Amino acid sequence: MELVAKIFCCFYALIITVSCRTIFYELTASYFDGAPDGVPKKILGFNNQFPGPTLRGSKGDWLRIKVNNQIQDGQTTTIHWHGLEQFLSPWQDGPRMLTQCDIPYNHSFTYEFELLQSGSYWYHSHHTSQYAEGLWGVLIVDNTPAEIHAYDGEFVLTLSDWFHLPSKQMSEWYEDGGLSRGGLPFPDSSLLNGRGYYDCKFANLKGLSCNPSYATRYQVLEVERGKTYRFRIVNPSTIVLHIFQIHGHKLEAIETDGVDTGRVTGVDRVTVSTGTRYSFLVKMDGNLDQYWIQSTADLLPYKTDYPNINPYPEAYKADPTMLAVLKYVDTNATALLSPSSINPNAVQGRPEIRNFPLLQSLLDARSVKAPSEPILDGFTLYPKDPLNLPYATAPYPTTVELDSPTTLNYMDCVPVGGEEAPNFVNQTIIISIPDIDHPDSIHKVGFNDVKYDPSFLDKPGLVKMILNETLPDSVQPITINGFGDDYVVELIISDYGDSGHPLHLHGHTFWVMGYGKGEEGPFNETHHRPILRSGVRKETMAVQPRSWLVIRFRANNPGLWLFHCHMNFHFESAMGLVLVEGGDIVKDLYPLPKDMVNLCKLSGIDLAEKSSSNLVMSNLEFLVVFSLLNTVMMLHGLFLVS
């Protein structure tokens, strides 16, 4: 069946010019000793590395990622590929007990999916609060045949928060309202590419050892004068949003969450909320030899006016900034010509319309070219991890930030290709977010006062959907009443709390139609509807404290898709819901993959007895058959169901 998949891939390549490579990675989750900020701690990571290995491929490649669970205390786990829509591959999305069973200790599971979109992404555990302890990494997908914007080189920077306490202990404290009194666990430090610094004075007060030399452990990014570099910025924080800037240099935004955008110029800094990614072009036109790269945590929403599980939150509040060094290595070099604005043969890397080519186009392809490459080892193909940079030595930069910097306006990041939001809506979903962190919120509740809890699922929710079984109210299932590129759903979100929430939608990229400033109040149809407009496309967007957000998307991806707050403690305790999309189509077309049946059996969940044998396929069989059936449906006018 693998050969059939490869042949199908090459037929497909003849039409849309994609690669036929399969790239293999192997990730092993386990605890190991580390000290990201100078304070020793057991880190939960991949391959004894923090952050986890950077994975890379090109649009059209197939990724095959074997995940080995060797977490020593017996925890189970699952992995989510954040931002990948998993079109035609909903089983690979990763939320535990929604799309898959857990991976038990001392067992493995292999994720496999085609990269149908390009851009900057990341992967992380979607199980309890594991990624707060380090179980995450970066995933980059190069555009084909070329990137939209030309540049001479690139860097990847991750901006994250860090905790010294175990995540399970913090989660239990937070969910006990009598203890937390509405306060989130306060981070101990910030990390840039997994490196940071903690004031050893506070470590001594907590009885922890600490290495003071980490205070001058700055990564150095070496650049050539006159060249233009792409900076991919990723925020995998558990809680904190970060403000990013490069002293003395302007940022030109070119990507938001995998969507190529037109250049937004003249920007000094950007606010990057949890889960989001941006790319910027930066021209190396400075007059000095060195400049600070600065990331500052925004701690205003987080409470310190009553006891926190972190006994010394003032350590972070006093020093919320992380630094790296931008260093010119050829100060006498002649300035190079600036790269052209747009590569003429490039296309938007994250498509809006998701229909496959018509079956007739496949049949008209006259030649079948066998795959030219075998399965490739990703670590051999991409041996240098972009997060591993050398450390700077004194003297360090002396630059300072601007007094009145300009901040990126997200709505200015218009997608390349002119992809505007549809000007109609078929279904509106109202979401109310309570003040979950109020001191009187002893019992944590989530969207629309429902506590999200997948523990009531006796089998993965996607399986229940296929078998026409009722999903429990505890996952707050909301049925999307139509399906297709011409069926548009709008979410209207009003936040009544004082911390704000980065909201992430699985399986889709949405348009941000509008959002309110902090303390503006809930969405008002009369006042706010007239100011909505098609703006940035993303799949993670923050609603401001006591304010509103409106997003819009096409319901063209059949499956079961999670929508949740990406502050991990908020989601783990309450804040999520499930969108049920393409119900009858899913039931008719999605077989149960053999590997998923086998995985669930390890947890004592027997899916095989619930399904006829002809509904159980391998993952590759499923992807190929579904793709072909999808095109047949299009020919018969069945794909665009309303």
Image (tube, rainbow, N blue to C red):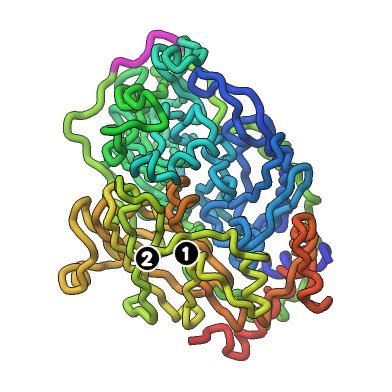
- In the image, is 138 to the left or to the right of 502? right
Say few, some or many: other residues with alpha carbon within 10 Å of mark 2 (under 14 / 14 to 19 / 20 or more): some
Q: Position of residue 459 (x, y in %)?
A: 67, 65
- 249 falls in the magenta region: no
Q: Is residue 232 visible in the rendered structure shown here?
A: no
**SS label for mark 1:** strand
Q: Is residue 564 visible?
A: yes
Q: Quadrant of residue 432?
A: bottom left
Residues marked 2 and 1 touching at CB (< 8 Å): yes
- Where does the image place residue 476, in percent across and percent down from the top left? 48, 68
Region rendered in magenta? 393-398
Q: Is residue 509 left or right of residue 23?
A: left
Tag on residue 448?
2
Q: Look at the magenta stretch and give its main secondary structure.
A: loop
Foreground: 137 or 268? 137
Q: Estimate the x, y position of residue 250 in percent, counting from the top left.
A: 30, 36
Residue that numbered label 1 is attached to: 577
Type of the residue with mark 1: Leu
Q: Looking at the figure, which quarter contains the N terminus?
A: bottom right
Give the left or right position of residue 96, taking residue 618 as reference: left
Q: CA distance from mark 2 to mark 1?
A: 10 Å
Element at badge 2?
helix
The residue sitting at 47% across, 64% down in the picture is: 577
Q: Residue furthest front?
A: 178
Q: Amino acid at mark 2?
A: Asn
Residue 133 image label = none
Name the N-terminal-most of marks 2 and 1.
Answer: 2
395 part of magenta stretch: yes
